[in-house]
Amino acid sequence: MPSDLESFTENPCKMCLPLGVVTAVYGIEKGMNILHGSQGCSTYIRRHMATHYNEPVDIASSSLTEEGTVFGGEDNLRKGLDNLIKLYRPELVAVSTTCLAETIGEDVPAMISRYRQERPGLETEIVSVSSPGYGGTQFEGYFRALQAVLRGLEPDERPNSYINVIPPPSSPADVGALRELLEDSGLPFILFPDISENLDGVYNPVYHRLPSAGTPVRLIKQAAGARATLELSLFAPENDSPGLYLERAHKVPLLRLPPPAGLRGMDALVRALKDLGASFPPKHRKARGRLLDAMCDAHKHFALARLGAAGDPDFVYSLSALAAENGVPLVMAATGSNCPDFSKIIKPEQEKSLSTLGIKESFLRDGADFSLISRGSRETRVNIFAGSSDARRMCRELGIPLLRLCFPIHDHVGGQRTRLLGYGGSLSVLEGLANELIGLEAESFRDRIKSEFFRKPSLPAGGGECALPAASSPPDPASPHPRAAFPRADRGFAEFPPEGAEKSGSLSLRELYGIAPSGVDPSSLHPCFSLEASHKLGRLHLPVASGCNISCNYCRRDHDCPNESRPGASSGLLTPREARDRFREAREISPALKVLGIAGPGESLFQAEKTLETFELLRREDKDLIFCLSTNGLNLPLHVRELHALGLRHLTVTVNAADPETGSRIYSHADYFGERYQGVQAASLILSNQFAGIAMAKSLGMTVKVNTVLIRGVNVSQSERISRKALSLGADLGNLTAHVPLSGTPFESVAALGLGELRELRWKSAAFLPQMTHCRQCRADAFGLLGEDLSRRLRAGKDPLPKPIRAPGISSAGTRARPLYRIAVASRSAVLVDNHFGNSERFYIYESDGADLRLLENRRVEGGGACGGACLGPEKVKERPEGFIAGLIDLLSDCDGVVAARIGESPRKILEERGIGCLSGYEAVDKAVLGLARMLGRGGGAA
Amino acid sequence: MDVKTEILSKYKAKVFKSRKEHIVEVDNGSEQLIAANTRAIPGIMTNRGCCYAGCKGVVLGPLKDTVVLTHGPIGCGFYSWGTRRNKARPNESGENFVQYCFSTDMQEPDIVFGGDKKLRQALSEAYQIFKPKRIMICSTCPVGLIGDDIHAVAAWAEAEFGIICAAFSCEGYKGVSQSAGHHIANNGLMKRIIGTDDRRPEGKYPVNLLGEYNIGGDGWETERILKKIGYSVVSIFTGDGALADIARSHTADLNLVQCHRSINYIAGMMKDAFGVNWLKVNFIGVEATCETLRHLAEFFGDEELKKRTEEVIAAELEEIAPDMAHYRERLSGRTAAIFVGGSRSHHYQALLRDLGVETVLAGYEFAHRDDYEGREVIPTIKEDADSKNIENLVMEKDRRYRMFLTPERFEDLKKKMPLEDYVGLMKDMPDGAYVVDDLNHYETEEFIKHLKPDIFFSGIKDKYVIQKGGVLSRQLHSYDYSGPYSGFRGAVLFARDVSMGLFAPAWKMVTPPWAEKREPNAGKAAFKEAESLKEAGDA
């Protein structure tokens, strides 16, 4: 699925083979490169290497044009060699092929031998390297060049006392440190290649056109007679490995060692050299001691990391070794090369690095591009990244710091002097890492402590005295908060906050749960995403979307059932233009209207053009509107960018399963690009698009809520997994809801989840993903504040008197351990009990067990609003129809209790006679409902 | 022996013969010819790139509303990723593909069995992820050789996804430099994009900005000035540009041509097909910018516009006057060498003149003779095999052809400004200066030795060669991650950067404590000394 694509590479994490060849040959004394092909290859590679190394990089080209391409390039190559040799007088020239030369089938070895024959007495060695760009990456190219040079030179097999040492692709500074170690060992050695000076020169007014340092050609010839070869790479491909070649062709014993990174890696090299007779001056012992000392000093910081790394396989291995021996959780490791052994070799190190803290998430891949690496980093919540400067775009998007440690580094100076290998190199990486982590911690410390210890008392969002989960649970050591310290520059919240909707003193859910706000928290402005805003900002759902591309077993999409306040229900479909008109109308009624949502009645992205057009029209009405959208996610990846472009910042995706098997029990089919998928296939498709869509939305900076409809016996056991998955994709908020059993659906007879159960599940999930606890399961055309559906005011025609509904399976009190009570509340605002019984135009009907509550409906009172009580004085008494109170009481006859600011004596009496409990007082709605429910539970009645 | 002969003397006879035609000592008294746009000599470090670099890297790469997909092995796509510093803001719908690199990453089996299947698949995936409205496919060397029909695949994608998809066969081996790629890109834009949207721009004086790639934000400074005066910029080719705008570029009244080399084909073709006049402009340099602005006002002939132009010029000049005076004082009397692209070596001489810096050597990487000698030589340029291989489109008058100027007024204006004309680099240079085409590595060193410029403007590939020799080198391809250098404010930034480089304290500290005698402190003197040491060593 997206970002794990077969044919489309988005932001590559690898370069082509000739770049590796050229780098290796740069480590040969008086060695020169000529690429046989179009001159662009040389120019591009020169440009990239010069920018990284801040050094001149000379690569000749045979400058093939169309003529050479058609008739063969031998003439060009001959001229190229002539000119190169005359002007530069190199000791060795490596002729490397390119895509072009290989595709037209140039026989370079034959050309070279003809060239030599024509020029007897030629002193320059010429070797050929077959290096088509499509044959691999720079990593393989590096080793292939070394082997080709060994093959191309006449070997001197006479035994000598040299030790061949083959470093992995690394920085000149690392190679220099390696050479110093070898020099100090007292052993004669051939370090091949040695780029330490050629690609890290000093200021020297005498410019040497030829690489004047590096491995001398005469020594390379003697490699065939050396005592042994130490190849410091775990991934050099068998066909390209210079060490294997020397062993097979010239019987030079080969010892393959890991790159000498970290204590164990470097110890292994030192031990191997000692076995060969080396003895080292005390400075290396001290260097080891210093590294160990630094590891002890800095260890406490490493646990803060969730490290990601990408680069050459040996580079990533080096980091994994360092991570393993320092307890730095390496959650994400990837290479761009196709390297079959990559995962196998790195996995044990990665596991070691994660084991201390018991971190489960990890990501490990070869053949990855940056879109995949970015996904992996998101999934595993990487908070610091090590790699090349190509990772900078991704890191900026993720808001994490980047340690630039491997080729290419184009946006910093000093690429030639990055360190990784040896005791000293490891020390420098570790300290760099520790200091970044300290910086992260320091920047986020205040926010975190503030939110953990100095949080204001919060609004209970459900169970009265039940403690909020994050307040009492200790911070998870594996998920530090430093992410929050980085402003996410690319999120593009430029249009927020809208005027007059600034965040007030109270807390958003993010803060409530101890998650420090990142910059402007747009969630605080949206009623569905913030408890605070839910009482203040109106919202209008526009029913423009019809039809659906998936079929859920719990769903039945009826268009006209105005009494049902549940997703998918709506009183008729609007065209985008009608939707705009409805918005205008609604604005008249409620000027505070800020939030416009599309949630149905069908799937909002099934006929996405309607949704997009609606947003576009509305955007023209008011640029400050907050848009939200609810979708099943199947088509989300296709449209998320357009939606973002239209200013959508709040997205709700309904994810009902964590794996396709479970999904297949919920989704019966999916229609996608003209195909109908069923069963597990449908579920896989739906889930993968949901996940990809969420990740994409997050990368665009949207706030994402993940809704889950929990169905008893189907996916309830998965609620935690779903929340974790949502978190790993970056979702901001979860919303677990109980499914509403509807007749005519496959799940009609499955009992809905009880409020207590639901609360329990939410509580569990809230430990890691903030939960929306105030969901009212809105209609697709809801209007007004949450819990105050004014939509019927917008609809034409006379409002029918709502019939009492009783959701099947919910409220038959006898079957439950804790009885549920239905309580009517006289309120204007749905926040406070602020109306008198007889004066109320509407009642909010809640259901509560004393611990949690749920809004069932909003019941209108015909002719309401005229108070008959004496409480307001005789002049306020208005005419009201005869039998009004009796009718009112009849209207509430299905309820177990009534809450109002005041209730007259006679109505109270009648209510109590009918067994309906009463509570009066000026109180928050939720508190009052819970209080009355508890009272009723104890057998109480009035207060 | 004069400088030229001495430098050439090291070459083999054949190379000598070829290279001597590319090096000219300017003598404005006589008609001077230069050889250009010929094949690079193999084995000499040419700074030239390839056809793909010209097409994808230069012309198409900066388009922000377009997925530019490289069809080929990974290298070419990777190396052209973010290397040209062409800045772009996301457009209104939030699209900006400039930060991305897209490739089909062809592997060996694709070369053997054909890559069109993978290309098709990649297009589907690209569409699935990004839903782009436009995709441009650029091919690299092996694609042309194995015969993938990328144009057929593009047509398939158009039908399949209902998008605009065009393919560019810009294989690296075509032509002799990136110049071939410019031409191919120009042809493709003309055939497929320009003239596909007839909505007229709303503002007054609608113009297109051609050959402005917005390196380091140059285009933004230019646009700022144009908008301040009251022009409406319909489209920019192609820095911070969008195909959606280019589609309606034919509705503009005038094309402003900044980089003549890379975009003059479109200027010519739009004139032939739609009647849009073009004017050679230069927004590099304060004087040059003022002159260009006055030409523009004259072209439209509107008195109000002329008045506004003078007001803006006066205000802008006042703003930068103190800075420019300061830098001019510091830099005056210095000498420079410039070796870049196909137009900038000319443009930047104007800015250097503003600062009192004389250009002693200038050269182009991939220019044609008309860039050196002026447009009038075009009919005399002999076509060779390499240039014939690039399609030359002949445009017929479109039904929407309209003339903004009467023929009389056109002739009249032509006398006052470079209207549909380009003078050429050599004519703007003083006698005795050198002009070198496709300057290579060896010649660079030799010319530095002989001409001793204080500063050498070039690119990253020779920057460190020059700087190791003690001569300041600034990159004029990518501006050393600085910029903009265009217009009024850009000129100050440029002057600051050059001063910063020339007066860097490091140059004064090159003499080590163990040296017997103090090395002279100026950079070029250090270089001279080095050369004498080198010669002593060689002897």
Image (tube, coloured by chain):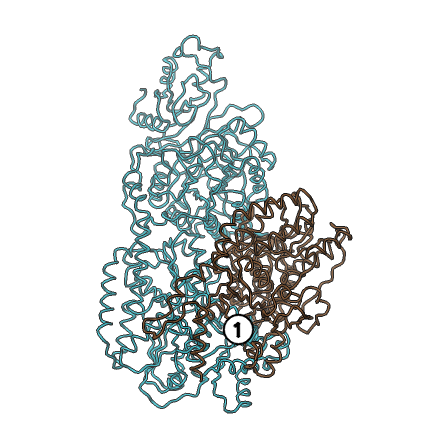
Chain colours: A cyan, B brown
Q: In the visual, does A707 lie left or right of B410?
A: left
Residue A535 place in picture, x, y as percent: 42, 30
What chain is tagged by disc 1? Answer: B
Q: For the C terminus of chain A, give its image quadrant.
A: top left
Rendered location of residue A68, percent (x, y): 62, 77
Return the x and y of residue B161 as percentages of the image width and height.
61, 54
Does B323 appear above or below A21? above
Most extreme residue toward the top, as rendered? A874
Query: Percent position (x, y) of residue A156?
Result: 39, 89
Residue B49 visible here = yes
Is B118 situated left or right of A379 in this image? right
Question: Which residue in the protein does label 1 denote?
Answer: B447
Residue A279 or A231: which is nearer the viewer? A279
In front of the other: A101 or B372: B372
Residue type (three-letter) at the residue carrying disc 1: Phe
Quadrant of res A732: top left
The count of marks equals 1
Quick check: can you spot residue B142? no
Look at the numbered disc 1 and give the secondary structure of its residue.
Answer: helix
Residue occupying image coordinates x 43% and y 26%: A829
Q: Which is nearer the eye, A473 or B481? A: B481
Q: Residues within 10 Å of mark 1 (few under 14, many from 20)?
A: some
Question: Up-down: is A278 above or below A823?
Answer: below
Query: Relative to A786, does residue A890 appear above or below in the rendering?
Result: above
